[in-house]
Amino acid sequence: MQRTKIIDALKRTDFGSPITVMGWVRSKRGSKGIFFIALNDGSTIKNIQIVGEEQNFDEAVVKLITTGACIKVNGVLVESPAAGQASEVQAKEIEVLGTCDSTFPMQKKGQSFEFMRQHAHMRLRTNTFSAIMRIRHNMAMAIHTYFHDHGFYYFHTPLITASDCEGAGNMFQVTTKNLYDLKKDEEGKIIYDDDFFGEQTSLTVSGQLEGELGATALGQIYTFGPTFRAENSNTPRHLAEFWMIEPEMAFYDKTDLMDLEEDFIKHCVRWALDNCRDDLEFLNNPRLDPHLIERLEGVLKEDFVRLPYTEGIEILQEAIKNGKKFEFPCNWGDDLASEHERYLVEEHFKRPVIMTDYPKEIKAFYMKMNEDGKTMQGTDVLFPSIGEIIGGSVREESLDKLMAEINRRGMDTTSLEWYLDTRRWGTCPHAGFGLGFERLILFVTGMQNIRDVIPFPRTPGNAKF
Ligand code: ATP
Ligand code: MN
């Protein structure tokens, strides 16, 4: 179909030329026999104004031009007398492609995000959600561009896995077995021999272990795909299905890793400022987040704090002494809650923090142990208003040390032998991290709830659409 996208129409200056635009009506108003339509086609947050004289159109057709209706307009591009827009369209013919009656749920402005979540399939037609989705696309492009330009290979890891010791969260099982008639052995355990894969399988909670196989062959890889965690907690920062970016690098030590985390995330924020200006300006408003752009620019200016966990605990203890109240305890050895992370980032340092060297008891088996035998070389990035945005670490490359840790934890290595082969043959120092894509989008859009930065959220009790 021949049409001019609204983003292009708004840039055109060949006034007097014929033009065809199509899109959805955001609003229509009229006065003294003239109607004004704000039309949007998703190509930009900006609407194009359509102007028409009622007497030139069939009254029945004009009545059908309601909020949410889809129309095609043939007309002439003219210079706009109105402030804030260069051009508008003087309508000659209007065809209603799709009518939209008053039952359309996104008709009213300023509806709550809660209400819009219940109509997630239609909220994409609103300004806020179209802005978020355009930013989401741009961040995906930022990520691929960054890694491609830095010599990383996009590496595809499987979504179905037979290893149950990734340890990052509860898993969803994958089976073709008849759940109404499960065969069990004498001990009451389900028999998987006759299941599709001949063993118990699940949806992956992380591509890291396979990513390490890629990095220890190709040097530097990254994954970017869906990840599944049966997180039975309803928080504004957890989804059951989310997208994760997991770079993994051979010959990286802790400093290299922290440098990459910081440079990468700054690149993404800069990309948003450079490529999503109109959408960011729209989101930067009193109803949503009046300090959004300022906060994004702030992240670019400052060096991230690099803070060993032990020092972090000391700062938190000091704060408690001075009267700060936290809901959860934070003694040495405790996993920090998001309130602690946010105190450090938002109140104490007032800039992003890379927290390092965590107690081994709260981190995964594959992390490289420090010489103290108590802490591991983790490098999590903590962000304002989000808390943990990246979870990273140097990986233990010594087979002996890794096996000692696996045994200490009483883990079964049957389904992990292929992973241990990386350490058996030609092992090398390496490191990597995982960035939750939606947590990045939360930060970049200033949205408060992770359900509002993915088109169709999956959370406990909700798999609709
Ligand atoms: P958290 O403590 O916030 O649950 P985690 O320690 O489980 O995070 P990792 O296993 O290190 O997180 O995963 C790497 C990254 O993936 C996290 O830093 C975060 O950005 C993201 N992430 C983890 N779980 C979720 C989830 N359920 N929904 C969305 N993003 C997530
Ligand atoms: Mn978690």
Image (cartoon, grey):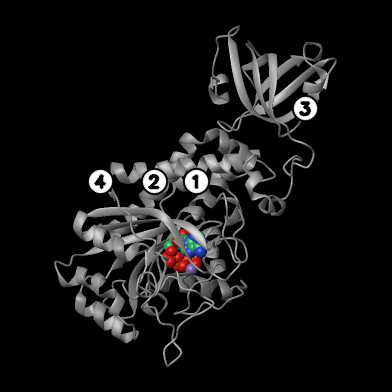
Contact (CB < 8 A) between labels 3 and 2? no
Circle 4 packing at 10 Å, graded few (<14), some (14-19), many (20+), is: few
Residue at x-position 66% and y-position 53%: 117
Contact (CB < 8 A) between labels 2 and 4? no
Mark 1 or mark 2: name the one nearer the start of the chain.
Answer: 2
What residue did someone put label 3 on? Answer: 64
Q: Is residue 457 above or below residue 17?
A: below
User: Marks 3 and 1, Cα distance to the nearest angstrom?
Assistant: 47 Å
User: Marks 3 and 2, Cα distance to the nearest angstrom?
Assistant: 43 Å
Given the current orientation, which residue lies at the most extreme bottom position? Answer: 186
Residue 71 is tagged as: none
Q: Kindly indicate the quadrant of the structure image that contains residue 108.
A: top right
What residue did someone put label 2 on? Answer: 143
User: Which mark's residue is nearer the viewer, 3 or 2?
Assistant: 3
Circle 1 packing at 10 Å, graded few (<14), some (14-19), many (20+), is: few
User: Which mark's residue is nearer the viewer, 1 or 2?
Assistant: 2
Mark 3 or mark 2: name the one nearer the start of the chain.
Answer: 3
What residue did someone put label 1 on? Answer: 298
Percent position (x, y) of residue 57?
Answer: 77, 14
Q: Kindly indicate the quadrant of the structure image that contains residue 183.
A: bottom left
User: Which mark's residue is nearer the viewer, 3 or 1?
Assistant: 3
